[in-house]
Image (cartoon, helix red, strand yellow):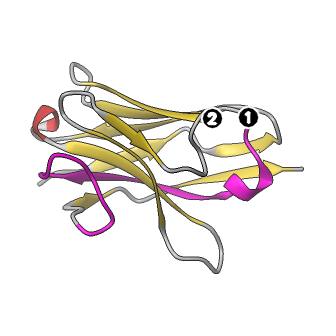
Amino acid sequence: QVQLVESGGGVVQAGGSLRLSCAVSGRFSTYAMGWFRQAPGKEREFVATISYSGTRAHSDSVKGRFTISRDNAKNTVYLQMNTLKPEDTAVYYCAASTSRVVTSTNVNYWGQGTQVTVSS
């Protein structure tokens, strides 16, 4: 059974930074990993993905501000979030897929989510 456990969420002022972590049990190096977020009253949206080999992609809304990375030795994926805006406020979810990259339709495993609140 694969488990994903997020950490690092919290409250930060606009313009600040946070780093989310997601610790993964199981054969981490074989999974593509990703981050999604869901704001109140909105659908869950894709944020970023990283393949098992390190190829990355970010959504247009976070490109240039957020960076996804992974440490296969630590079975952990990260999301570095800089220049945060109030509209980044959401529950952030870690996701794993057996496909080459993570998309909204191929997630095999989800984390429980971590709250990020950006105050203006």
Q: Quadrant of the N terminus?
A: bottom left
Give the farthest residue toward the bottom: 41
The image shows residue 73, relative to residue 51, as above or below, that is: above
Residue 112's disc number: none
| Residue at numbered disc 1 | 83
Q: Is residue 84 magenta?
A: yes
The residue located at (19%, 41%) in the rendering is: 25
The residue located at (90%, 50%) in the rendering is: 120
Q: Dot 2: what SS?
A: loop
**Where does the image place residue 119, in percent across and percent down from the top left?**
84, 50
Q: Dot 1: what SS?
A: loop
Q: Amino acid at mark 2?
A: Arg
**Where does the image place residue 45, in percent across and percent down from the top left?**
49, 65
Q: Is residue 113 magenta?
A: no
The residue located at (77%, 47%) in the rendering is: 85
- Which of marks 1 and 2 precedes in the sequence? 2
Q: Amino acid at mark 1?
A: Thr
Magenta residue span: 83-105
- Give residue 50's quadrant in the image: top left
The residue located at (23%, 37%) in the rendering is: 51
| Residue at numbered disc 2 | 65
State the residue in front, 108 or 111. 108
**Alpha-carbon distance for marks 2 and 1?**
6 Å
105 sits to left or right of 65: left
Contact check, label 2 and label 1, Cβ < 8 Å: yes
68 sits to left or right of 104: right
- Give residue 91's quadrant in the image: bottom right
76 sits to left or right of 100: right
**Where does the image place residue 18, in percent across and percent down from the top left?**
64, 34
